[in-house]
Amino acid sequence: MKIVKTIAELRSTLAGPRANGARIGFVPTMGYLHRGHISLVEISKQHSDYQVMSIFVNRIQFNDPKDFETYPVDLKRDFDMAEAAGVDAVFLPDDAEMYRAQRTFVDIELLTNHLCGAHRPGHFRGVYTVVCKLFNIVQPDVSVFGQKDIQQAITIERMVADLNIPVRIIIAPIVREPDGLAMSSRNKHLGAEVRERAVVISRSLRRAEELIAQGVRSAGDITASMREIIESGGPSAIDYISMVRYDDLQPVDRLEDPSVIAVASFFGSTRLIDNMIINKTNGGYACIW
Amino acid sequence: MKIVKTIAELRSTLAGPRANGARIGFVPTMGYLHRGHISLVEISKQHSDYQVMSIFVNRIQFNDPKDFETYPVDLKRDFDMAEAAGVDAVFLPDDAEMYRAQRTFVDIELLTNHLCGAHRPGHFRGVYTVVCKLFNIVQPDVSVFGQKDIQQAITIERMVADLNIPVRIIIAPIVREPDGLAMSSRNKHLGAEVRERAVVISRSLRRAEELIAQGVRSAGDITASMREIIESGGPSAIDYISMVRYDDLQPVDRLEDPSVIAVASFFGSTRLIDNMIINKTNGGYACIW
């Protein structure tokens, strides 16, 4: 596995495989890898021949400089996990390589005012900008984003379509613990007792799936029922339970095709998120979660 | 010469030449071609093997919808001129092909508050966004922009650097009438008498070049001298005579390396622009205008 620190070196590293007809797969990360990241590489390998992973803690997407400075780093472990997963090249630029005097930014109007964007001004702009840069640097054929961060995945799809970026975006399924809790590096902060109660989040999604199968279409009815289930687990707070249109993440009153139901809730002091994508199928709706 | 209306068809048109190792040159236009556009193609041919020209009147860069609706169109003449200039493929998308439900925009902070951006909110955002889209659609090796619209040329260079777009931007010299007046489709609006007086604009740039050669470095001194010359031609108004830093287009008090001196002035009811780029050389400054 090659570890490459400059844009020029990455481009020359990729020139060979590309000239030989290899399809380039790309998984952007901020490092401190966990099984979720590795699942993205595994899906990328199903669609491409040469795997690039970037590890770059992207300063411009942090609202609080302290969060940026204290972002966890464990490169040795990251490299081991990436190599074991079959990554061919890790792109590991430093801040100066990525940002000299950046004044150009990519932003998406309207999409980021709901869900997780509400309290993070500029966060998504920082994400779009770095992903756009990385796509131009790597020029991948496919790039994989996790459904776990559904707002990021959908808005990146939107950016790629709107800016005509020649890359195929794949949204990878959420990796779950046996009881259904979505995997997250935050889960380790949950005490054993709180951890057990947190299962109500995925259980609420299962309830939503059942209601939709029974013909319920009202966002109010579905989210009220989900709220009841989550409250039974004693969350310290529920941030949101929302049904939104897939295309623009705007709230809807009744189920549309396609839609997303997204949840954010605190258990103890840990904020947990989860979601499902709902697509119309022959004679019903498919819920992907 | 191929005329291509869809993104998919353009991509497949370019796949062949690209696979054969042809370097793709790209000149974006809004049509209604004049000799300035053709000079861009000629420069592009010096640096690439296959010439793409886009003709697309970009709705989102117009502040006034009426200006968009009344933008002149003469495709028959454009095709003849493009073919004669050696263009291989014209990309002629309609509005729906380029903009379905565009919500993603590219913008550059700070650079557009001076010069021609001051009174056109959103104009440059529309330009950056469409050029970014076109670069992703055409994926050219080189793309040529005219020095005449220096603010556009420099900010596109900046966008390309900031977003790591893999294209080389070439800034083409200003094409001038024998007396020095920069060519423009607007010159035809000048009556014969006004047209003659308008020569003071390029003459003021020549004066700036002389002053710089004599060692004058003060922006105030240089622009005051230029103003005197332009006023001698009886302009109906002078919009600006500015010395700005090349990199960020911010006004400077003293000549820096590199800098730009830009002029916008009305003669009759016609707004004319002109400019020079100033680069430090061994033992002096080179003025490109």
Image: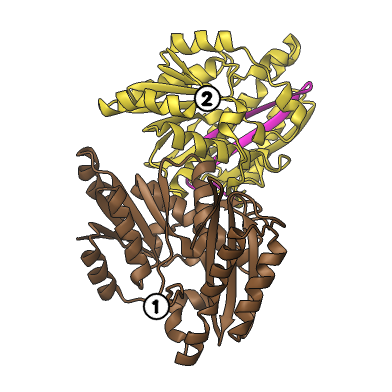
Chain colours: A brown, B yellow
Expressed as whole percent of the image width and height from the top left, the position of residue B229 reads 69, 28
Could you say whether the residue bearing mark 1 is in a helix, strand or loop?
loop
Expressed as whole percent of the image width and height from the top left, the position of residue B275 reads 58, 32
- Which of label 1 and label 2 is nearer to you? 1
Q: Is residue A237 above or below residue A22?
A: below
Expressed as whole percent of the image width and height from the top left, the position of residue A221 reads 70, 66
Q: Is residue A153 above or below residue B149?
A: below
- What range is drawn magenta here? B253-277
Residue B136 picture quarter: top left
Q: Amino acid at mark 1?
A: Pro
Q: Is residue B158 left or right of residue A260?
A: left
Name the residue nearer the viewer: B43 or B103: B103
Report in which chain the residue with disc 2 lies: B
Q: Residue at x 42, y 12 (%)?
A: B1
Q: Residues within 10 Å of mark 2 (few under 14, many from 20)?
A: many
Report in which chain the residue with disc 1 lies: A
Q: Residue at x 52, y 60 (%)?
A: A150
Q: Say if labels 1 and 2 share a chain.
A: no
Residue B63 appears anywhere in the view: yes
Residue that numbered label 1 is attached to: A72
Residue B101 picture quarter: top right
Q: Is residue A75 left or right of residue A162?
A: left
Q: Is residue B265 magenta?
A: yes
Q: Is residue A165 magenta?
A: no
Q: Is residue A79 above or below residue A21?
A: below
Expressed as whole percent of the image width and height from the top left, the position of residue A247 reads 59, 49
Label disc, if present, on residue B174 of the rendered structure:
2
